[in-house]
Amino acid sequence: MTSTNTKNRLRVLIFAPSLDILGGQSRQAIRLMDGLKREPDLEIGFLPHNPRLPGILRSLQSIKFVRTVVTTLYCMLLMLWRIRKYDIIHIFSASYYSYSLSVIPALFISRLYGRKSILNYRSGEAEDHLENWRTAVPTIRWANEIVVPSGYLVDVFARYGLRARAINNIVELDRFTFRERQPLRPVFLTSRLLEPLYNVPCVLRAFAIIQQRYPDAKLTVAADGYLRAELEALARDLNLRNTEFIGFVPFEKMPALYDSADIYLSATSIDNMPSSITESMACGLNVVTTDGGGAIPYIMTNEVTGLIVDRDDHEGLAAGAIRLLNDNEFALELARNAHESSRKFTWPYIRDEWLKLYSELAKEKNFLLSHHKEAQKPQMT
């Protein structure tokens, strides 16, 4: 059935980082809300982890350390006021301090008001968090449901006695133009944050090997982070040519950046379900990546939709890229397979999973969402 009376709508509050915090969580939250707001049975609200203080108080958020305290306290006040007005609290979660400062209070206040909560845990560092932070597992149990973006994290949570279900991240295929790259050019892209977790030095070392074979090869590093100066120095030490660090690229400009490259390189040490890889798959960009601590094989299949090597293996990363450049037919087959596989990351395929979960949590209210009316699945061309 479809509700027309707004009083009968299921009220869902999305609690996630806003775009003031650049990263995958904020992007996924916006994509999710864009889809859910089209559902007539739902009333969607948003509360940011990082709310801006009102008026003159906002200046406090420019002061290091002070901003953490005042933002956390203000966010808690907003939670106390707003959570009680909703039926389901959908909580986006990273790990470590972000989890402790934002997510634990949201879970506690949801329980305090008797509201159903979904912990949408999205960090590839889950295993270390669950193993070494004593507050993690007990407080995660406060959630009514745990949702993660990949089967990898389902397995990680199971090892700690926590039952999670996987619902994929969303890729907006209509933002990307699929292009078959033939012949494949030695034009490379990486867009992982310039932080230790993402192991960009491995990409630079791999590119040094590639450039010995292809002197005119190009690499664009489209990201920023506190290691940027160190990585730029490493690029000079490796005598890399045609290597450009362009800093952070706004989301709306990423499709053009993907389209300008032919091979995407990623060497992350720990990962979950990186949007950069699923987006590359969608637009026909060949992917060569490390296994991300075992996570990447849950979204890519080696030698079917891309090439996967061991962590921190810059020689393997380079060899994979050179293999693609030497065998264009193989590279084209991988790109086509990846494009087809990317369908499962689109909203029409993911929509029903979220609506089904919301309906299950709302059973006590005798509420039934119209998720039984399946959205038409897109046909890929």
Image (cartoon, rainbow, N blue to C red):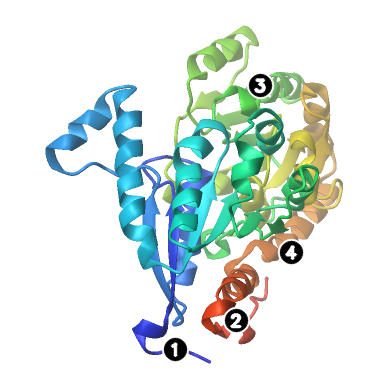
Q: Secondary structure at mark 3?
A: helix
For image coordinates 36% across by 66% down, the residue present is 85
Please name whichever residue, 109 or 78, is drawn nearer the observer in this view of the structure.
109
Dots 4 and 2: beta carbons under 8 Å? Answer: no
**In the picture provided, is 115 more to the left or to the right than 286?**
left
Image vertical order of residue 71 relative to residue 5, above or below: above
Within-10-Å neighbours for mark 2: few <14, some 14–19, many 20+: many
Instruction: Give amino acid for label 1.
Output: Ser
The spot of residue 83 in percent (x, y) is 39, 59
- Location of mark 4 (residue): 340
The alpha-carbon separation of the residues under discs 4 and 1 comes to 35 Å
Q: Earlier in the sequence, mark 4 or mark 3?
A: 3
Please name whichever residue, 256 or 186, is drawn nearer the observer in this view of the structure.
256
Instruction: Give amino acid for label 3.
Output: Leu
Within-10-Å neighbours for mark 1: few <14, some 14–19, many 20+: some
Q: Earlier in the sequence, mark 4 or mark 1?
A: 1
Q: Earlier in the sequence, mark 2 or mark 3?
A: 3
Please identify, in this view, whether the residue under mark 2 or under mark 3 is nearer the observer: 2
Within-10-Å neighbours for mark 4: few <14, some 14–19, many 20+: some
- Location of mark 2 (residue): 371
The spot of residue 40 in percent (x, y) is 44, 82
The alpha-carbon separation of the residues under discs 4 and 2 comes to 24 Å
For image coordinates 48% across by 63% down, the residue present is 114
Q: Earlier in the sequence, mark 4 or mark 2?
A: 4
The spot of residue 194 in percent (x, y) is 54, 26
- Location of mark 1 (residue): 3
Please identify, in this view, whether the residue under mark 4 or under mark 2 is nearer the observer: 2
Dots 4 and 1: beta carbons under 8 Å? Answer: no
Instruction: Give amino acid for label 2.
Output: His
Res 256 seen here: no
Q: Which of the numbered marks, if any, corresponds to residue 204? A: 3
